[in-house]
Amino acid sequence: MAEHIPTRNPNEIAKLRRAGEASARILTEVASFVRAGVTTAQVDAYAAELFTAEKCGNAFHGYCGYPGHICISVNEVVVHGIGSDRVIKDGDIVSLDVGAIVDGWYGDNALTVPVGQVSEEVRRLLAVTEEALYRGIAEARQGNNLADVCGAVEDFVKPYGFGIVRDYVGHGVGRHLHEEPSVPNYRPQHHLPHLKRGMILAIEPMITLGTFKVKVLDDKWTAVTKDGLPAAHFEHTVAVGPHGGEILTERPRNALPEQLGIAL
Ligand code: MF3
Ligand code: CO
């Protein structure tokens, strides 16, 4: 229902950008901390220190009882990995998801980092997932339908034969972590709303090397691929603009094909 999707004015978008930029700074710093030999609990503790240094709120800690400060999802963990004694190894990929609150406004962003020597097919998975995010962002312009965003992600990923996760989707974001609308990474069967300038979307493709099917572990959070193959996750918070999505969580790209030594 498009009527329930808030639009934010330039003043509000400036506030959202402050939250987005805090989220992006923390995400970028945590990404540079990730290396072989550290545990995901150490990564979470480092992230907690960064939130303290930023003096911003944490959008995830305590959300629906979530125990971590960020999500740290290694290899077969698709999303919502909780810091633990799992040791990060050479050849792993680690998805990091960070949400910050500044003055009651929310920013949400994620990326996947390769650790050491990662196989070529997994490097391709990372590059395709990051590029799919940017294809979706390009379609987040006023006058388009939300389905154009969802379809751009799906259309870009499909030829590679990777799995497109369906059980988790992107979302509106603003005064809460999750607002309307849902932003699937595929064209849904049902009607989707038209996009108006100032709608705020968290676009977040979750793409797998094998099956798109996921299951949630007994901790009620950790979502893993059913076949145990790795998954990648990239996310930005964007404002629907006249020429495409305006990224509120700007950061350097970390999975361009040339950075990963592959061609798409
Ligand atoms: N980016 C994810 C989402 O939008 C992260 C949520 S983690 C949670 O759902 F802990 F807050 F649930
Ligand atoms: Co999100």
Image (cartoon, rainbow, N blue to C red):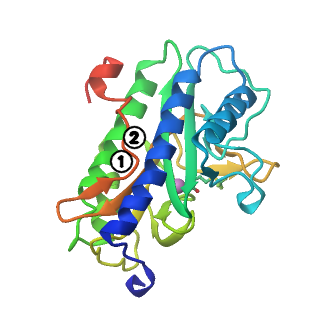
* Ligand 1 is within 8 Å of the C-beta of the residue at disc 2: no
| Rendered location of residue 9, percent (x, y) | 33, 72
Residue 258, placed above or below residue 200: above
Q: Say what secondary structure mark 1 lies in.
A: helix
Residue 222, placed above or below residue 26: below
Residue topped by disc 1? 133
Location of residue 154 by image quarter? bottom left
Residue situated furthest bottom in the rendering: 3
| Rendered location of residue 172, percent (x, y) | 46, 67
Location of residue 199 by image quarter? bottom left
| Rendered location of residue 92, percent (x, y) | 58, 22
Q: Residues within 10 Å of mark 2 (few under 14, many from 20)?
A: many
Question: Is residue 190 left or right of 243 when viewed as pictured?
Answer: right
Residue contact at pointers 1 and 2, CB within 8 angstroms:
yes
Instruction: Tell me the CA gap for discs 1 and 2.
Output: 6 Å
Name the residue type under label 1.
Answer: Leu
Q: Which mark is residue 129?
A: 2
Name the residue type under label 2.
Answer: Thr
Taking depth in this image into account, of 82 and 44 the one nearest to the observer is 44
**Rendered residue at 53%/19% (across/down):** 115
